[in-house]
Image: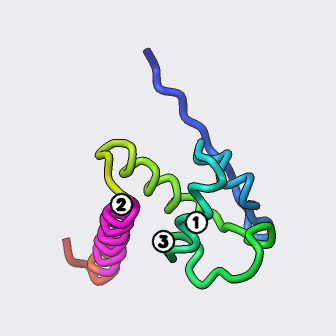
């Protein structure tokens, strides 16, 4: 059986709403709200959830969080730590690559 890839393209001028992000991640809106309220997603969000807008980077992070939580039955804090560390590793590898270090 072949894997089916799904993607959501978010251009620089548009952003996803709460409902769109939840749908793109195949989760309930409450899942997204809980992670925003704890600062795991959309850092520094304030106000009504209906006014939140999510970038493509937020979408990637949310999907990674969801994947870690499901695959390892991890709680949201553990999943956030894993995603934070993997993002930091990618950032550092990029710096090493830019500096010509293999």
Q: What number is the disc on residue 40?
A: 3
Q: Is residue 13 left or right of residue 60?
A: right
Q: Which residues are magenta?
A: 76-95
User: Where does label 1 land, which residue?
Assistant: 58
Would you say residue 86 sits in the magenta stretch?
Answer: yes
Q: Is residue 61 left or right of residue 99?
A: right
Question: Which quarter of the figure has residue 94?
Answer: bottom left
Name the residue rendered at 69%, 53% in the picture.
9
How many numbered discs sit on the rendered protein? 3
Give the CA distance from mark 1 to mark 3: 10 Å
Whether label 3 touches label 2, CB < 8 Å: yes
Give the CA distance from mark 3 to mark 2: 9 Å
Q: Is residue 26 left or right of residue 73?
A: right
Name the residue rendered at 46%, 20% in the picture.
2
Residue 39 location (% of width, % of height): 51, 77
Residue 62 location (% of width, % of height): 52, 58
């Amino acid at each position: 059986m072949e894997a089916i890839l799904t993607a959501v393209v978010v251009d620089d001028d548009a952003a996803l709403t709460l409902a769109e992000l939840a749908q793109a991640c195949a989760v309930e809106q409450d899942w997204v709200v809980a992670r925003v309220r704890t600062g795991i997603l959309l850092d520094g969000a304030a106000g009504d959830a209906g006014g939140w807008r999510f970038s493509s980077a937020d979408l990637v992070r949310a999907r990674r969080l969801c994947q870690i939580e499901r695959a390892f039955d991890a709680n949201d804090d553990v999943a956030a730590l894993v995603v934070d560390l993997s993002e930091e590793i990618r950032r550092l590898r990029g710096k090493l690559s830019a500096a010509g270090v293999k």
